């Protein structure tokens, strides 16, 4: 990446971290979208997105835990096999065209999720341990392969299946993102032993944006508007990945 583009990329990462943390997410899909739009190499996108995800998810986990929304009994079955599977996914390096299509689908799914709003915020039942462990394994592998934490899938799943209320789902997803991102990063680094130098500048921007976003998001920002703006960015990047060579 040319040095003159770094300030603009850093600013974009700060904005993404701010917007995502306003709605309780770490932002991996947004970081991937931005880095894709800046035409970074896929080998640099994956570990960088995981590093930024760890930092912002850590902030979110702490705040949701302090607010009393976290449920250990709901979290651990999903995380049990997700963590080792995220390590495996992080270790594996897919061919560039496969990576682009897979991540493109993830981005489009993320965009659709931001347009979706649950009509019911009640809890009907808790998932069976077997179902949670199995689903967690699949989400962990996908998280490691794509450089995301898996929260973009876990949160809507918990809400759609009425396994958790919105804030409880966000709290569980925050730690799920954190542990999967850490495992995926370890797997990636154990294989490539490479972390781009510009990741340090982006990490500082993500911390600043994530901290500010969490603060202002808790003071009743219009989450619906933010989600739709994010959806547009994700939609553009997803289409760019899938339909360009």
Image (cartoon, rainbow, N blue to C red):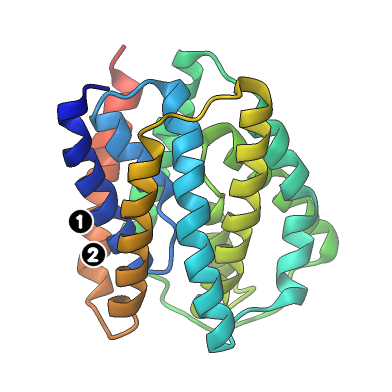
The kind of secondary structure element at disc 2 is: helix
Q: Please tell me whether residue 128 is drawn above or below residue 107 in the rendered image.
A: below
**Extreme residue in the right direction:** 130
Does residue 185 appear to the left or right of 46 in the view shown?
A: right
Where does label 1 land, which residue? 229
Where does label 2 land, which residue? 226
Q: Please tell me whether residue 83 is drawn above or below residue 214 in the rendered image.
A: above
Q: CA distance from mark 2 to mark 1?
A: 5 Å
Packing grade of label 1 (10 A; few <14, some 14-19, many >=20) is some
The C terminus lies in quadrant: top left
State the residue in front, 30 or 241.
30
The N terminus lies in quadrant: top left
Q: Is residue 2 visible?
A: yes
Q: Please tell me whether residue 149 is drawn above or below residue 20 in the rendered image.
A: above
The kind of secondary structure element at disc 1 is: helix
Answer whether labels 2 and 1 touch (C-beta < 8 Å): yes
Residue 80 percent across, percent down from the top left: 80, 55
Q: Residue at x 32, y 38 (%)?
A: 33
């Amino acid at each position: 990446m040319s040095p003159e583009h770094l300030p603009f990329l850093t600013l974009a990462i700060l904005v993404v971290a701010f917007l995502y943390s306003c709605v309780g997410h770490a932002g991996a899909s947004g970081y991937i979208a931005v880095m894709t739009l800046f035409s970074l190499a896929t080998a640099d996108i994956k570990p960088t997105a995981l590093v930024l995800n760890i930092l912002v998810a850590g902030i979110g986990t702490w705040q949701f835990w302090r607010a009393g929304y976290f449920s250990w009994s709901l979290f651990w079955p999903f995380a049990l096999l997700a963590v080792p599977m995220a390590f495996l996914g992080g270790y594996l390096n897919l061919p560039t065209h496969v990576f682009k299509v897979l991540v493109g689908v993830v981005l489009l799914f993320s965009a659709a999720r931001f347009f979706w709003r649950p009509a019911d915020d009640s809890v009907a039942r808790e998932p069976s341990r077997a179902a949670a462990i199995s689903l967690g394994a699949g989400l962990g592998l996908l998280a490691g392969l794509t450089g995301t934490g898996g929260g973009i899938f876990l949160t809507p799943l918990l809400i759609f299946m009425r396994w958790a209320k919105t804030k409880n789902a966000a709290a569980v997803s925050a730690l799920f993102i954190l542990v999967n991102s850490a495992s995926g990063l370890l797997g990636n680094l154990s294989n490539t032993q490479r972390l781009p130098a510009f990741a340090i500048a982006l990490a500082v921007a993500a911390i600043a944006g994530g901290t500010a976003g969490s603060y202002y998001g808790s003071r009743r920002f219009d989450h619906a508007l933010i989600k739709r703006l994010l959806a547009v960015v994700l939609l553009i990047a997803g289409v760019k990945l899938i339909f360009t060579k």
